[in-house]
């Protein structure tokens, strides 16, 4: 089972507004309001603060950058927006999706990593999951950090 096809910017003739609208429609219909479930609980997305009339979670799936107000579009993230739902739904049964947990501050996150190429981060809440972000892991230092974290988790939490 492979992830959905990429959604390339070139398929929209270089029209950024059309591309962004199409991505946002996918986000709303398939992720935010698509009845997405993980491990028997619903997956929610952060709506506020909205920017340009779009949910906060959407921007974390299609943009990069550490400073919220200074994020820029990432075409590789954009192309893979449909991978988010696919990974969440298939993680429990897919050999190529690694799953582990980490703690950031007091927050426990579940990480889903497809072929060491694309990462989805879910935060565990009382009775639901919060989709935090998703991004391509193409920087060798970040890949090494994730491998180290995953492998350490596996050593202390054997299946």
Image (tube, rainbow, N blue to C red):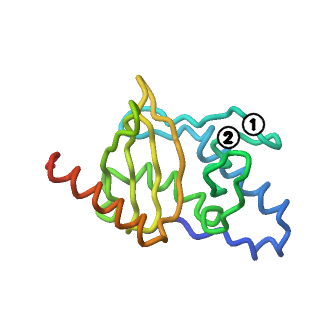
Which residue is pictured at 44% across the width and 37% down the height? 123
The label shown at residue 15 is none
Q: Circle 1 is placed at which residue position?
A: 50
Q: Circle 2 is placed at which residue position?
A: 56
Q: Relative to 13, is 44 on the left or the right?
A: left
Q: Relative to 154, is 45 on the left or the right?
A: right
Work out how far the residue at label 1 is from the one at label 2, CA to CA, in angstroms.
Answer: 5 Å
Q: Above or below — where is 121 with respect to 74?
A: above
Q: Secondary structure at mark 1?
A: loop
Q: How many marks?
A: 2
Residue 110 position within the rendered picture, expressed as x and y whole percent measured from the top left: 37, 44
Nearer-N-terminus badge (1/2): 1
Which residue is pictured at 23% across the width and 58% down the height? 151
Q: Relative to 36, is 15 on the left or the right?
A: right
Residue 148 position within the rendered picture, expressed as x and y whole percent measured from the top left: 28, 60
Q: Secondary structure at mark 2?
A: helix
Residue 120 position within the rendered picture, expressed as x and y whole percent measured from the top left: 47, 52
Tell me if mark 1 has few (under 14), some (14-19) or many (20+) residues whose alpha carbon lies within 10 angstroms of its own.
few
Closest to the observer, 155 or 40: 155
Q: Above or below — where is 50 with respect to 8?
A: above
Outermost top residue: 126
Residue 133 position within the rendered picture, expressed as x and y whole percent measured from the top left: 54, 48
Which residue is pictured at 33% across the width and 44% down the height? 102
Tell me if mark 2 has few (under 14), some (14-19) or many (20+) residues whose alpha carbon lies within 10 angstroms of its own.
some
Q: Above or below — where is 30 with respect to 148?
A: above
Do the CB atoms of the residues marked 1 and 2 lie less than 8 Å apart?
yes
Which picture quadrant has residue 106?
top left
User: Which corner quadrant holds the N terminus?
Assistant: bottom left
Which residue is pictured at 52% across the width and 51% down the height? 85
Q: Above or below — where is 127 with respect to 110?
A: above
Closest to the observer, 110 or 6: 110
């Amino acid at each position: 089972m492979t992830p959905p096809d990429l959604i390339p910017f070139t398929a929209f003739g270089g029209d950024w507004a059309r591309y962004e609208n199409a991505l946002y429609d996918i986000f709303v219909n398939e992720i935010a309001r698509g009845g997405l479930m993980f491990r028997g609980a619903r997956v929610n997305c952060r709506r506020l603060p909205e920017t340009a009339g779009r949910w906060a979670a959407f921007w974390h799936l299609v943009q990069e950058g550490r400073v919220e107000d200074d994020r820029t579009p990432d075409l590789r993230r954009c192309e893979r927006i449909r991978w988010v739902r696919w990974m969440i739904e298939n993680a429990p049964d897919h050999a190529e999706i690694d799953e582990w947990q980490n703690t950031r501050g007091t927050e426990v996150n579940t990480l889903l990593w497809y072929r060491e190429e694309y990462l989805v981060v879910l935060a565990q809440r009382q009775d639901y999951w919060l989709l935090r972000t998703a991004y391509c892991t193409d920087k060798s230092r970040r890949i090494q950090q994730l491998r180290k974290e995953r492998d350490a988790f596996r050593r202390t939490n054997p299946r």
